[in-house]
Image (cartoon, rainbow, N blue to C red):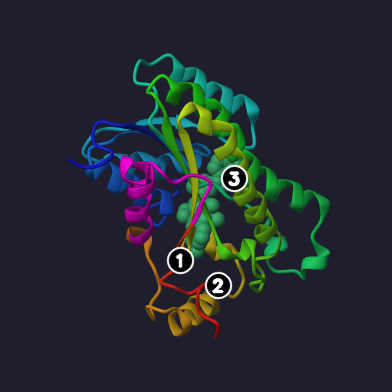
């Protein structure tokens, strides 16, 4: 029996078939979880309809722009009306205005900073707050978000997104402390670079991929399946003693000195 079999999970951040959140959704579905997937806007809903049709159990699809409190409230109102409760939440939403990911960091505008931190970090807090009561009805739960080493080290053009990821990882620790008493665990997967829609916004991204291939301990890039398998571990009972952590799925890039 798989770890998430018979569990109900909310997954935020599927834009298309390359999305890391989609790799996690596919793995969770294959493992027997019942899913709720959200989409940012109507344009992305078309993609999600097509993807959802490929899963073995039809997921519930609901709208949620994470920068809008009313969307988050409506999402959890809807979920509270169902009897299932929630066992896990995957947070895979991030965004920074394109110009902030190419201009020198010093040029970061107040508005770009606000948007990046709001969408990429605050949203985890808001979603965790909504999910917690639904997890309590199930006796606890597991929350996983997705980060990147740019939180801690400087990568060309990652810029304000690195600052947002630092805020995200810190939020994970505070949420873990806050929600731990309710049996809810909160962890981060820090993934190596993968070519996705979000990654395409970072100038020179293929150069980063090449550097990882050359220097990572495993001498390869990672893909969505690497992230999805680690997510299954963090979402399921095998990781019951782990919370507030950053787990690196980067083929061993971070540990190398040069
Ligand atoms: P992606 O573009 O497929 O996913 C990003 C998601 O964020 C999309 O589904 C998009 O709809 C959603 N999003 C953006 N603004 C939103 C809003 N206002 N409301 C709701 N949703 C919103 O790209 P991805 O690479 O799969 O990104 C998923 C997560 O993984 C992000 O947090 C990203 O920073 C992180 N990550 C990615 C990489 C990588 O190299 N691709 C590496 C490490 C971490």
* CB under 8 Å between discs 3 and 1: no
The disc at residue 205 is 2
Q: Is residue 152 above or below residue 182?
A: below
User: Is 6 left, or right, of 38 in this rendering?
Assistant: left
Q: CA distance from mark 1 to mark 2?
A: 8 Å
Q: Nearer the viewer, mark 3 or mark 1?
A: 3
Magenta region, main secondary structure? helix
Dot 2 falls on a residue whose secondary structure is helix
Q: Could you say where residue 100 lies in the image, as x and y percent from the top left? A: 72, 61
Q: Could you say where residue 175 lies in the image, as x and y percent from the top left? A: 59, 38
Say which label, 3 or 1, has the lower sequence index. Answer: 3
Taking the spot 37% from the left edge, 78% from the top edge, the residue there is 218
> In the image shown, does 221 or 96 lie closer to the viewer?
221
Q: Nearer the viewer, mark 2 or mark 3?
A: 3
Taking the spot 21% from the left edge, 39% from the top edge, the residue there is 56
Under 8 Å from ligand 1: the CB of mark 2? yes
Q: Is residue 194 magenta?
A: no
Find the magenta span and give its range.
226-246
- The residue under label 1 is 195
Q: Is residue 48 above or below residue 220?
A: above
Q: Quadrant of the N terminus?
A: top left
Q: Could you say where residue 207 lies in the image, as x and y percent from the top left? A: 54, 79
Q: CA distance from mark 3 to mark 1?
A: 28 Å
- The residue under label 3 is 173
Under 8 Å from ligand 1: the CB of mark 1? yes
Q: Visible in this render: residue 197? A: no
Q: Quadrant of the C terminus?
A: bottom right
Q: CA distance from mark 2 to mark 3?
A: 29 Å
Dot 3 falls on a residue whose secondary structure is helix
Dot 1 falls on a residue whose secondary structure is loop
Say which label, 2 or 3, has the lower sequence index. Answer: 3
Say which label, 1 or 2, has the lower sequence index. Answer: 1
């Amino acid at each position: 029996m798989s770890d998430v079999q018979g569990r109900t999970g909310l997954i935020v951040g599927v834009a298309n078939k390359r999305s890391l959140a989609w790799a996690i959704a596919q793995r969770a579905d294959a493992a027997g979880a019942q899913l709720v997937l959200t989409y940012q806007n109507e344009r992305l809903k078309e993609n999600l309809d097509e993807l959802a049709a490929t899963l073995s159990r039809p997921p519930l699809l609901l709208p949620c722009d994470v920068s809008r409190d009313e969307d988050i409230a409506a999402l959890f109102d809807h979920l509270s009306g169902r009897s299932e409760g929630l066992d896990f939440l995957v947070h895979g939403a991030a965004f920074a205005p394109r110009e902030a990911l190419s201009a020198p960091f010093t040029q970061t505008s107040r508005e770009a900073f606000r948007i990046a931190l709001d969408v990429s970090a605050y949203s985890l807090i808001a979603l965790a707050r909504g999910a917690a009561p639904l997890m309590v009805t199930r006796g606890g739960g597991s929350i996983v978000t997705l980060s990147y080493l740019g939180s801690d080290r400087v990568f060309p053009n990652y810029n304000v997104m690195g600052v947002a990821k630092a805020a995200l990882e810190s939020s994970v620790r505070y949420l873990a402390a806050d929600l731990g008493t309710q049996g809810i665990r909160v962890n981060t997967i820090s993934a190596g670079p993968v070519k996705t829609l979000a990654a395409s916004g970072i100038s020179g991204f293929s150069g980063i991929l090449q550097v990882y291939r050359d220097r990572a301990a495993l001498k390869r890039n990672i893909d969505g399946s690497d992230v999805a398998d680690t997510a299954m571990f963090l979402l399921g009972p095998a990781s019951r003693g782990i919370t507030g952590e950053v787990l690196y799925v980067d083929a061993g890039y971070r540990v190398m000195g040069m």
